Image (spheres, coloured by chain):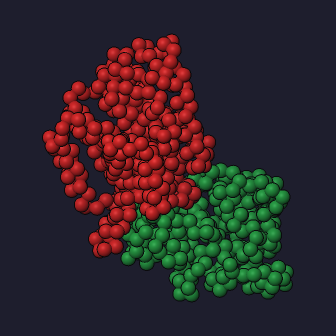
Chain colours: A green, B red
Amino acid sequence: MSDGSAPSGAFQNRSASAGPVSETLLETQGLSKNFGGVKAVTGVDFRLGRGELRCLIGPNGAGKSTFFKMLSGQLPPTAGTILFDGSDITGEPPHKIARLGIGIKNQVPSVWDGLSVYEHFFIAAHRRLGARRAAAVADELLMKLGLATLARRDVGALAHGERQWVEIGMTMAQDAKLILLDEPTAGMATDEVERTVALLRAVNISTSLIIVEHDMQFISMIAGIVTVFHQGRILIEDTMENVLTNPVVREVYLGAGRPGR
Amino acid sequence: MAPVRLSVLEPLLWAAGAVALAVVPFALSTFQVVQITVFLIFCLLAVSLDLSWGLAGLLSFGQAAFFGLGGYAYAILCANDETPGVALAAGTVAGGVAAGLLGYIAFYGRLSTMFLAVTTLVVTLILLQVLGSTADPSYHVGAAVLGGYNGMTNIPPLLHEPTPFFWTAGGLLFLVIVSGRLLMAAPFGRILAAIRENERRVELLGYDVRGHKLAIFALSGAIAGLAGALFASWGGFINPEVFSLAQSAQVVIWVLVGGRGSLYGAAIGALLVQAMTQYLGYIGTAYTTLVLGALLVSFVLMMPNGLLPTFLRGLSSIGIRQR
């Protein structure tokens, strides 16, 4: 979809082939990552509009998590560029990218086991706010996420679903422009998944989201446009309905692939 | 409200500690006062390591190096007719600057945690060699002759009377522990704890963790330097033995035995191990090192968290809440 040679001025007002016409928030051009001889991501041209909620799907090893790690600065790309909110963030360190407004929840829950739920939200908000206002944000999030009764508990002692919410809450406390969530509902029960969907819809009012998921039910509940990754490339980008009926997708992902992990 | 974790009972504990430090010298002989003073100095050294290792997860084998540099700085300045007060401050700065330099290389060069431990140990052993090779009188700093393995002697004390010196060392230890505890409860301390638990997560929130790690590491080195200066003042001598492998390991052992992360545990560990070393020497066994080694092995096997955390968990399991 991208001509790959577009200078920074050109990507601002371009509409993607799939998706609504809107201002571009994130764009990658020819983004690639090799691990030795293994090509994890190859020449990915990706565009996300401001305010969009996008789901990424694809079999395990399709390159989704590697893609996320490049967007958040955890892995330097081998080739290609990442443009976020008008600036080139390719190869910037994680803390700089976070300050520009990208929050991420990695696939493997990454929390501070010895710290309380409250402290997680406080520290996440305190980067940009003073102690008093960060504490107010933390209190508000505890209510919003239904974690108020667990506020002083160590996160190491929480159930898996609750830990996922803590990490989602941290990205919310950051006040990011774009939140990347890698398998946010893994290990959640059905009612917890539904609560997460409601929560993310509310988050999406003010924030753009990219979500990697395997749970098809979750995706049909939440997604507008779905991007399918396969062997490090974008296979197709369309509505969930069209993706599900696409014969190529059925073959590489739903048929041959092993959903969930 | 900041994320405070201190118990409301803790200030009471501080008050009790302050009173104990104030009255203890009256109950002891002069010899005992002098002896306990050096224990307090070692407590300060142990607490300094706990600030970087227990709080932020930065294991340093170089605590003895910062301690030794503090001691040498004190001795050198005193020999050059500076007042002991100025020399004490210089010792603190020397420890802090050395830790700051090492920390800058380690953290901004993105060395791993394990590499930090190895690097600090190597630097300590290099100092042992370097200062050991200064036997020739041509090695001097102003009027201060370094003296090779014999070290420097006749270092003037900060205070001549044992009891005021006891109060000074005890007061400084008290001050460091109390402000250290307050620091741990403050947002900066909680961010350091988060770095210990999962550094990447902290970075992904937009924090430049290198600065945080450098700050606590330099502070930890400064306190070790202060302890070293007090030590040189206490005994009136300092020699390169402070940079030996045994000394470097000793500090880690104190913290390991007492328990990491509370500062109190580190101080208790230093007190206990030193008291035991003293006792074993007193009853005249030739196997002090052997007994201490056995003690350490049994601690690592049976109480990997150290004395204080194990004790507190025991309390909470029989129904007494710790926080």
Quadrant of image for the N terminus of chain A: bottom right
Q: Quadrant of residue B21?
A: top left
Left or right of B265? Residue B12 is left
* Residue A6 rendering spot, x and y as whole percentages: 79, 55
Task: Residue at 24%, 60% (x, y): give it.
Answer: B9
The reply to whether residue B88 is visible in this rendering is no
Q: Nearer the viewer, residue A64 or B183?
A: B183
Quadrant of image for the C terminus of chain A: bottom right
Q: Nearer the viewer, residue A2 or A146?
A: A146
* Residue B312 rendering spot, x and y as whole percentages: 34, 64
Task: Residue at 82%, 79% (x, y): give it.
Answer: A252
* Residue A155 rendering spot, x and y as whole percentages: 46, 69
Task: Residue at 51%, 73% (x, y): give it.
Answer: A163
Left or right of A57? Residue B231 is left
* Residue B176 rendering spot, x and y as whole percentages: 32, 44
Q: Quadrant of residue A134?
A: bottom left
Task: Residue at 48%, 40% (x, y): give it.
Answer: B246
Number of marks in the image? 0
Q: Nearer the viewer, residue B280 or A181?
A: B280
With respect to residue B144, does A179 lie above or below?
A: below
With respect to residue A111, does A248 lie above or below?
A: below
The reply to whether residue B240 is visible in this rendering is yes
